[in-house]
Each structure stands twice: as structure tokens, then as C-alpha cells.
Image (spheres, grey):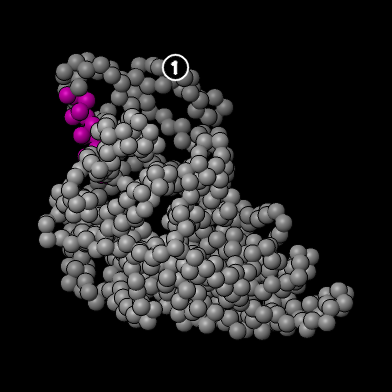
Amino acid sequence: GYCIILVLETMKTYSLEDGLTEDALVTKLRTSRYHHLFLHTSLRQNTSGTTRWGEYGAGGLLWGECSARHFEWFEGDPVTELLLKVKELYGLENEVTFRNVTVSYDYRPRPLHLGTATQIGAIPTEGIPCLLKVLLPSNCTGLPILYVRDLLLNPPAYEIASTIQATCKLMSNVTCSIPEFTSVAPAKLVKLLELREANHIEFCRIKNVLDEILHMYGNSELNEILKLLIDATWVATGLKIDFETLVKECRLASVRIGEMISLEGESDQKISSYDNIPSDFFEDMESPWKGRVKRIHIEAEIAEVEMAAGALSLAVTEDFLPIISRIKASTAPFGGPKGEILYAKGTCIAGSIIEMLDNIGCLGIVSTHLHGIFSLPLNIKNTVYKAMGTEYVDGQTIPTWKLIDGICRESLAFETAKREGVPETIIQRAEDLYLSVYTKENSSKIVHAKGRFHSETRTDGSEEAHPNLSKTMVGSVHYEIKSEKKMEVSQKEIERAINVICQKKLSEFNKQENTSEHAVVNCVMIAAREQPPPSIIGTSCIYVMLRPDKKLYIGQTDDLDGRIRTHRAKEGMQSASFLYFAVPGKSIACQLETLLINQLYSQG
């Protein structure tokens, strides 16, 4: 049969698969992502004895696949010569070693035939639905899909296949919340670490993986699943790792990363703030790096930045503010500030460019909002000023859409705002502000917006007002619990209140259904970065979202996983945790949802 050698330069590993049929080899080439293809000269030998490979029968399918790609011939010992070529391609020293991660075991089933793989949609084929898109949920993308596809195309040995099946069976029966199972491309990660280019985000992802392993290890339901995954991981990576060693190293690495980087919710570094400098300036300068690494490791750098911020504030106070004061002291003909310090330099650069274009005789049109350019003493001979014509009708400035000689002196900002639907109260206030700044009459009147607002009260007693937006969702309506009591609501208190409120209703339901089941509400906690177990898929549930802002959000759904993803996709809700319990059907779920909304307040 045929042999294929796969070399991964980033991981410094190689694996070898032998005894493959031509069909299996072509399937592998079509599904493997590779940058370089090398063919051994032994492939040229075929049954006809000719060196023109693929011309007579044997090798025809493989030759057709390879000839459509760029490849190079090589000879000698396949493994040795191929590794030498990889080192040459990537500029590696000869001393660099590659680890053999070949998984060698007997009685492995044959890979799928190319025809079978294409007909069932395991390989993307025009006109045939993709099998994996049918089998897997829509939110399953990337590495998990590639892994499952490889299992289909290259079935593992019976022992490993049985282990994977046992893992799936256990997973489908767990009742506790499960980790998010962060997927990280190892090759990319190793490259970033080698080049010392891994940033705060990458280290957070590494820590997520480590913590998820530790979470499974510490949970009685998930511990057995983690043990079973060890063998499947060995087959996928070629790395044979002792279970206890894996857990120990994960714990050490997680602690080490946690000692170095700032995790979500931690904040030991504040953005600089000075009254005479816009806060956006410091936000732009410091937010990309502050809060990434713990302060204890960058004390000197933070001190240097704080000194620079103080020096900048002092310079602005001593050198810049007096200039502004002098400018404001002198007024323009229309009563406004004579100088526009923010635009002065930009205006002068624009004027200089226009002079240069005029001097070389360039043909073109310059359109600008820098009206100060018309006051500059420009040395121009060929340039003419044009403007759009306007007329004043019924108290409004109306454009004529005609080009006329002269300089534009009017602004259509207020008219445009009205046309685009900006509320009249806002436009009126803008006009007042304009009059107060740009005319001598400082007689602006304050207009209060009379929009519809409502106040949402947090469980810690504070309030925030926002527009009363209607929430319309098919199949269910969600409500936010309002409480005027200043308090921190614990998970246990919420569970107790849910039990008190719902048990009576569930007991009545059981009597109606003639069931002898005792009405018990089993609440399950889903912490941040966790998801509900697969066993809850398609089951009617009541859930309470414990929002980071201390509010409670009540809902019911038949798709808890999807609903949680939707909530966490919203800004500020990524770390929200949930309490949920299953109920026997959509009807009772709607009733209990309404009951909780109405009665949680009376339970405190």
C-alpha cells in the first residue's frame, strides 16, 4: 500500500501512516490542510515499468489528484529526507528535533473509500448536502467539525471507538452544568508562544482550557468523562499523558498564568484622569495595555506613565490654556471666538496644499469644512471659490442645488437634523447652545426632553433610566424583577424563593395529571463560562439570569443553551450566571414564569 508522512513545523512533530489504499490516500490529500507537497520517487515505478507515472493504470487516481497541485519530487529515506526539506524551507537549524507522534495500533478499520466519503457528504461535494452540517448544531464550527470529520474518514481502532461512544453516553446523561470546552488551535498557539507574541487574550484562552480540565476533574459526574477523553486525545495528538500528571500540570500552569495576567473582573490599574485633558485621550493611550498584566509586574512602567501624564497636564495648564484664554478674550466680528485652535494647523496644511496644487496647474475640486481657509493669505492665481446656492424661505435655509460664485457662509446642520428625524427638543437645545456661544445674546432657555422613560431598579437598590423599549419575542415574554430594597441576593436565597413559589403550583399540576410524583424543584447553577448539560436539550425550563448589574431576569424556554448564548452575546452580559429547573411542558413553564415574576418580590 501507500505511506503518507505528515510534518507539522510549528509543533515540531511528524506522524506516519502506512498500508493505505490509493483511495484512502486521495481522501487524505483532499481533507488535509498543507502548505507543501512532496512525492517520493518510488511512486514513479508502476506495473508497466515506465517512469511516466499515471499513464498506465496504477496510480491514475492519485496522479490526477497530485498533478492538479504544486509538488516536488524527493528521494532517499522518506522520513529523514522530508525532515531535512522542512528544516530547509523554514530556516531551522539541523539540531532542531521533530517528535514522532505516530499512533501505532493494530486492527484499525480501513479509511472510507473516496466515493463513499463524497456520496455521504463527509467531503464537500457539489450537489450533495454536507453531512456534518446536518449532524451537528449550527453553533459547532472550526476545530470540533474537523475532528469529527477525521473520525468519519479515518475510523479509530475498536477500543478507541468504544471509548468515544462511552464518553458520549456519559455526557448525554449528566445533570450538572458543563464547561464551555474552549477550542484552541495548538499550532497557532505554539507559534505565538515561541515568538513571544502571545497576548493577554491568548493567555486567557490557555487558562480557560486549563480551568475547564480542572473543573471536570473536581466534579464527580464529569471526572469519569475526563478520564475517558485521555485515550481519544492520544489518538488525535500522538501525546500519551498520564491522567494525574495532566491534572497536576494544568493546576500549576493555571496558577502561574493567574499570577501574571489580570483576569476578568480584576482591576488594579486605573486610567489616568486630569480635568484639563479629555478623558478619551487617556482611554485611547492606556486602555490597550492597562489591566492586562498585574500591576506588581509593571510597577516601574506604570509609574513612568503616571509621571508622563502629570507632566502633560502641567504643560497644558501652563502653556496651552493661556493661549486659549487670550483667543477667547478677543472676539470675531460675529461675536464668536476669533481663533479655532483645534483646527488651525489642519487649516494651514490644507491651505499650503492648495497653494502647491494651484502653482503646478492641477485641475480638481477641493471640498472642505475648514472655513478658516478662506481667511488665510493664500498665494493663488488660478483658484476660484464656488459654493452651493441657498435661499431663505419661511424661516428656513433651503439649498437651490446650483453652483454659484463665492464662499459658503450658511450651515444646513439644523435643517438636516430635522429632516433626519432628530427630536425637536434636541434641535431647539442645539440652537440655544449655538446662540449662547456664537452671538452676544446669552439668552438660552433650557428645554427638558419629554421622552418616555422608565426606571429599572437593581437588587442593590440603585436605579438606571433608559428609553422604554418594547421587547417582542416569539414564544415567550421576559420580565425584569424590580426591587426597591437595597440588598445582595444570594443564589441560595433565590433557590429558596423559587421552591416556595413553585412547589404548590407543581403539586396542583401533578394532581391534575394523576401522577404520584412529589413536587420538587431541583435548581441547577450555570456559572460564568459554563453551559447547560446536553440532557436538557428540548426540555421546557424556567431560568433566572443573575446579571452582573445585580438585576434578575426571568424566562422560560425549550432551548436553554441557545437562550443563554443569546443573553451572553449582549454587551456586559458575558459573565452572567443562571439558575434553571426543568418542568413538564411548555404550558406549565409559562404559568410558573408569570408566577415567579409576580411573587419573587414578596419573597424579598
Q: Position of residue 54 (x, y in %)?
A: 33, 33
Left or right, 455 with reference to 205: right
Res. 536 visible in picture: yes
Q: Is residue 548 above or below residue 336?
A: below
For badge 1, the amino acid type reads Lys
Left or right, 420 with reference to 367: right
Q: Is residue 187 above or below residue 522?
A: above
Most prominent secondary structure in the magenta stretch? helix
Tell me the residue at 41%/21% (across/down).
388
Tell me the residue at 67%/63% (across/down).
538
Helix, strand or loop at mark 1:
strand
Q: Is residue 348 above or below residue 511?
A: above
Magenta span includes 342: yes
Res. 282 visible in picture: no
Left or right, 551 with reference to 400: right
Q: Residues within 10 Å of mark 1 (few under 14, many from 20)?
A: few
Q: Position of residue 133 (x, y in %)?
A: 55, 49
The residue tagged 1 is: 402
Tell me the residue at 36%/38% (across/down).
59
| Viewer-closest of 391 and 423 | 423
Q: Which residues are magenta?
A: 341-356
What quarter of the picture does the C terminus occupy? bottom right
Left or right, 54 with reference to 561: left
